[in-house]
Image: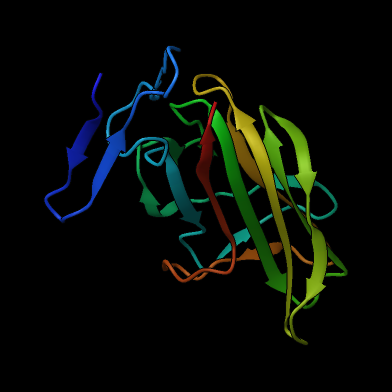
Amino acid sequence: MSAIKLNSSGGGSITISPASTASTLTLTAPAQTGTIGLDGPAFRAYINATTQTVSQNAWVKVALTGESFDTNNCFDSTTNYRFTPTLSGIYQVNGTVCCNAGASLVTCAIYKNGSQYSSGTDVRISSNVVTSTVVDLVYLNGSTDYIELYGYLSGQTTFNGGGSAVQITVFSASMVRAA
């Protein structure tokens, strides 16, 4: 059997050649359209207001009403403020919660299916700003699994937003590997 060669209009090519022995070579591609393995859901959301008022000393879901992008319409920015991807896989998830320096503690966490999955740490950027950032890899099943961003404040009652895509309280995720 001869090799299969796919040519690109840009000049590149991919060649698939059979093994040199009498064995069978199987190539399996994910069941999705577009670029193989790189077409998974991704989003970036933010607080689309100056601030979000919250209760102190309690975990509070961040109301992320603005979106920079949402490639597969998997982020709900109107009701639940959650990401429910349509493809199963491993996702890189990032969250940052920011507040003014009056806070004695600020922490953020990724919640998966309503339970805390991982949390960040308190960092003082300047004398005026305190943030917490969390970064983790999360498996999501592509149907019922969802993630949300929560924050915990002590000594302060608002998460900082800004009302534009350049935000200090943000949440994002992108598929890094299909299941």
Look at the picture and state if 135 lies above or below 111.
Answer: below
Quadrant location of the N terminus in the rendered image: top left
Relative to 165, is 47 on the left or the right? Answer: right
Question: Which quadrant would residue 30 be assigned to in this image?
Answer: top left
Look at the picture and state if 81 lies above or below 166.
Answer: above
Residue 109 appears in view: yes
User: What is the x, y in percent for residue 46?
Assistant: 50, 58
Look at the picture and state if 50 lies above or below 117.
Answer: below
Relative to 118, is 160 on the left or the right? Answer: left
Q: Nearer the viewer, residue 17 or 154?
A: 17
Residue placed furthest toward the front: 21
Residue placed furthest toward the bottom: 127
Labels in figure, total = 0
Name the residue rendered at 37%, 52% in the picture: 69
Relative to 52, is 162 on the left or the right? Answer: left
Quadrant location of the C terminus in the rendered image: top right
Name the residue rendered at 53%, 51% in the picture: 172
